[in-house]
Amino acid sequence: MEHYHMTRGTYFYAIGLSYKKADADVRGLFSLDEISKEKLLNQAKIEGIESLIVTSTCNRTELYGFAEHPYQLIKLLCENTKGTVEEFQEVAYIYKNKEAIAHMFRVGSGLDSQILGDFEIISQLKKTARVSKKFGLLNAFTERLINAVIQASKRIKTETEISSGATSVSFASVHYILNTVKDVPKKNILLFGTGKIGRNTCENLVKHTKNDHITLINRTKTKAEEIGGKFNLLVKDYANLQEEINGSDILIVATGALNPTVDKHCIQSEKPLLILDLSIPRNVNHNVTELKNVTLVHLDDLSQMTDDTLERRKAFIPVAEQILEEVKLDFNNWLATRKFAPTINALKHKLLDFKNAELETQRKKQPDFNEAQAELISNNIIQKITNHFAYHLKNDDMATDDSLELIKKVFQLESSTHV
């Protein structure tokens, strides 16, 4: 299928940037928190965008939506972030129609993740789809596509081992700690930030480090207390952050703030301190590296690590890609039907008009006209004709657009039947 028109002149686009070309600092410029996402969606609604999905994670920021030109979506992104159009163009990608659909499938399946097999993005897609629906910005096409991507993700998880073991940035951070720090169970660990990445990191810390000296701090203490209660961990007030940092051997920062929350002035102790910054934008000021006792590691550094498990996962990529193709085929078959359905319906109504006119003529000509039988026969013929056209359109991928135009021209159908 070449075109994905929803209204005349609009196309389906995926625009964005990811870890592949944009480093953490650039990704930080285009990062969207929940408030910024809602502002963007409100603006899209005002500007007449009919369907839009917005995702922003530590690895990528993307918009999937319908527009006459991709600049409409780029403008929305740049006007609601700190990034400029020029900065976007240096690192961005723009996909249209078929390529945009394929990109969403790869992202949602974990094949485009910074760490192969990391499926955390699929929950982001689900969440943002719900938000878009609340704003009236989720049309039938996009909702069906999201559901297809979710289906593909589930199949890849269950039918391959591409996500065997933990694959996320949160696990990579714990993996790094275990490989580089001696006597981890005896170290004082401070986790600052208990959002999704923080929660996952906490769970991995408890599961893999056997450490009883883990402290949690979050700006909203109740959120930290929920997790602390689950794992029986110590929770401290945000006001105690500096004191806790100086008592720690390992600091993990995952606050999701738009500006750095930790800098060198927070660190008064001279004992060795390992800091892992799992945030986009960066939540730890680079000036901490001016301190000789501090080692700073960012999530981009963590994602570059490979291990035997990750190498084994790569063997399942062909199977995962085959699953994607199967689910995409189902989606495209639905799309094909959706595309020609308005034309077939218009054709059916045109044939019914012919039938009604002819039956009226025959009633006047034949006193003993059998109307019931004529209705039955003509309706059956109309159904056979429309079924025949539908079958042709469904199985003629190379010329569907041409066939639709020919049918409209021959039967003088209304031209406003783009899907």
Image (tube, helix red, strand yellow):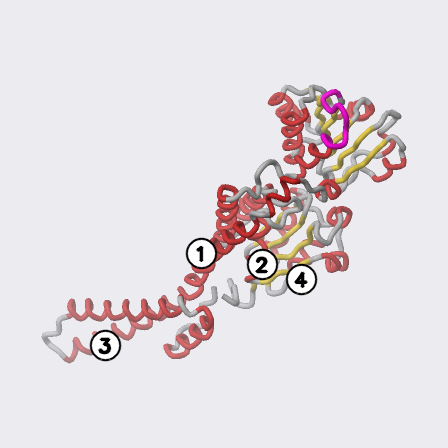
The amino acid marked with disc number 2 is Ala
Whichever of labels 2 and 3 marks the residue nearer the N terminus, that label is 2
Q: Which residue is mark 1?
A: 330
Q: Position of residue 309 (x, y in %)?
A: 63, 39
- Asked whether the residues under the numbered discs 1 and 2 touch, taking CB atoms below 8 Å apart as contact, a structural biologist would say no
Q: Residue at x 51, y 62 (%)?
A: 6
Q: CA distance from mark 3 to mark 4?
A: 52 Å
* Few, some or many residues within 10 Å of mark 1 (<14, 14–19, 20+): few
Crowding at dot 3, Cα within 10 Å, few <14 / some 14-19 / many 20+, comes out as: few
- Image coordinates of residue 203 in percent, x first then y, are 63, 28
The answer to whether marks 4 and 2 mark residues whose Cβ atoms lie closer than 8 Å is no
Left/right of residue 183 with respect to residue 353 in the rendered view = right
Q: Which residues are magenta?
A: 177-186
Q: Mark 3 — residue? A: 358
Q: Which residue is mark 4?
A: 71
4 or 2: tag closer to the N-terminus:
4
Q: Quadrant of residue 176?
A: top right
Q: Nearer the viewer, mark 3 or mark 4?
A: 4
For label 4, the crowd category at 10 Å Cα-Cα, with few meaning under 14, some 14 to 19 and many 20 or more, is few
| Mark number, residue 100 | 2
Q: Position of residue 61 (x, y in %)?
A: 67, 50
| Earlier-in-chain disc, 1 versus 2 | 2
